[in-house]
Amino acid sequence: MGAKREVELKLELARGGQQKLKGAPAPEGFAAERAATRALRSIYFDTPDRALRKAKWSLRVRRVGRKWVQTVKAGTGVTGGMSRPREAEVEVAGPAPDLTLILEPLMREGLWQLIDGQPLAPVFETAMRRTIRMFTRESDGSTIEMALDAGEIVAGERQQALFEAELELKTGDPAALFELAGRLPALACARFSRLSKAGRGYLLAAGERADTGPVNATEASLAADTALAPAFRAILLSCMDQIAGNRDTVLDSDDPEGPHQLRVGLRRLRSALKVHHRLLDPEIRKELDAAARDLALAVGELRDLDVLVEEIVEPAMAVARLGPDTALLDDDGLARNVETARLAARKSLRDQLSGPAVNELLFRLGALAHGTGWREDGEQPAATTTVGTFAVDALEKRWKSATRLAARMNELTLEERHDLRKELKKLRYAVEFFRSAFPARKVKPFLARLKTLQDVFGYLNDVVMAGKLAGMVAAVDAKPPVGPQVGPKVGPRVETALAAGFVLGWHEARAAHAFENARTLWDETKRARRFWRD
């Protein structure tokens, strides 16, 4: 067989989760064949220096019934649960690979080049029972294979359980794959896989743990002459990857970067939908934006409290502890009040992230990335417009939105300052979406200045948020007074309130200087060369 490009969606299942999918009725709009189960044994090979792993290739030989099938994959990474490797399969005589049988010249030559004369040896194996169900979308005949795997990965003495669902497009429209996933109740709360089986196996063989840390935004590499449709798809998949990955981080750890990056991913998504609104069906865009907004509000409650603790309360109280009146400031009581609110917000967010809302959004975004929900009235420019042309117009619009507010910088209310901050974020995200379509030497100075300005406005917003401290003071009894009291006797809640007042006052004094800095930075940004106008 020659090389082909796979389109796969990989989802992690709980133990026994495959049973719910094995016998589930076909969802509306789809027909399904009966499930068939078979045992599979796969052996993965690499060079001593792991040349294939480094290049994101994999080479395996799999026992299928009485046959051995060799598979080479190039581009084995997983983004937003999706894998799109280039693949070449061929039957071989036994459990050892035979590279001379690879029919596709580019795959064969690429593999030989990576190996560079080194010996190949087994690195790990997978042993599993695979249940296959074939689904057909009745509207257009698109076919999707659902593979339910239950087994283990084995590397020497190490073993790791494996429970996974893979949906692979066999023929037709890739959007059908996401439509099917969204209509299978057993997948409503499944996590998107961050790794392929090869990725998991290599980690196990090396004795390494999978990275469950925060996921930063990945830049879509877009040339100026890239057509708009694939460019928008790449941007959406980047947003999906950031949202899905940080959903896991928030569920698995208390790392403040988890909710931070999750909120960034949702904001990037909303900006992408706004920037590309001419491509999309207006009602579908509104629905997706509303879903992202609602989720972002829940994430924002926890993120705001993380900021309150680490960037507002702790720096101010560190200064207060150096002063003579420390005994009058119940910083422990203040910390307990804020931490109580933070624990409640984290539990509430985890409850929401464990439900079906996130996957509903992600599945719809996957379908959108492949054309479902695009305008069909001839008004959308995807077919004829390139990234370079589209980006100029999009960046100019975002710039004008920011300048309209910034022109009244000295008169802005606190709410309007927050609005300006949001406009600067939208401008920054748009710049980051399209930066690869412009010369880096022109983009970098503008983006650096924009980030600095955004950071200053972010701090000003955090200071406004510090006003919430007063409402938290009464939530938890503070500790008894410590040390000799000066003046009228005060109770513990008053001492906690004094601590909150100190924090707010300290930051308000700094905020006045920060706002002066913001005005200077805006003047510099306004005078800076707008790279998209060249």
Image: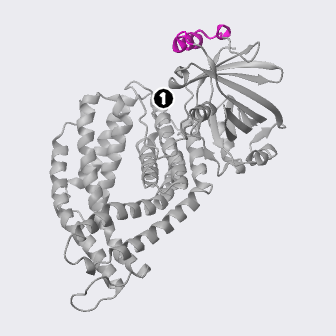
140 relative to 344, above or below: above
Drawn side of residue 507 relative to residue 123, left or right: left
Pick whichever, 144 or 348, lies toward us: 348
Residue 454 locus on image (x, y percent): 28, 51
Q: Quadrant of the N terminus?
A: top right
What residue sits 32% from the left and 40% below the top? 395
Query: Please, what is the three-letter code of the amino acid marked with disc 1?
Result: Ala
362 in magenta: no
Residue 180 locus on image (x, y percent): 69, 42
What residue sits 55% from the left and 59% below the top? 350
Judged by its main secondary structure, the magenta piece is helix
Scheme by which the image is coloured: one colour
Q: Is residue 133 visible?
A: no
Give the class, few, some or many, for how many residues have Cα within 10 Å of label 1's Cα (few <14, many ≥20): few
What residue sits 50% from the left and 35% below the top? 233
What residue sits 36% from the left and 34% below the top? 434
18 relative to 155, above or below: below
Residue 280 locus on image (x, y percent): 50, 42
**Among all residues in the image, which is located at the extreme bottom?**
488
Drawn side of residue 90 relative to residue 55, left or right: right
Stretch of the chain drawn in magenta: 99-118
Pick whichever, 278 or 122, lies toward us: 122
Q: What is the quadrant of residue 301 in the picture? A: bottom left
Q: What is the quadrant of residue 405 in the picture? A: bottom left
Q: Look at mark 1 in the image and give the residue it sits on.
A: 383
Q: Is residue 104 visible?
A: yes
111 in magenta: yes
Residue 374 locus on image (x, y percent): 54, 39
Q: Quadrant of the C terminus?
A: top left
Label 1 residue SS: loop
Drawn side of residue 488 relative to residue 146, left or right: left
Pick whichever, 314 or 81, lies toward us: 314
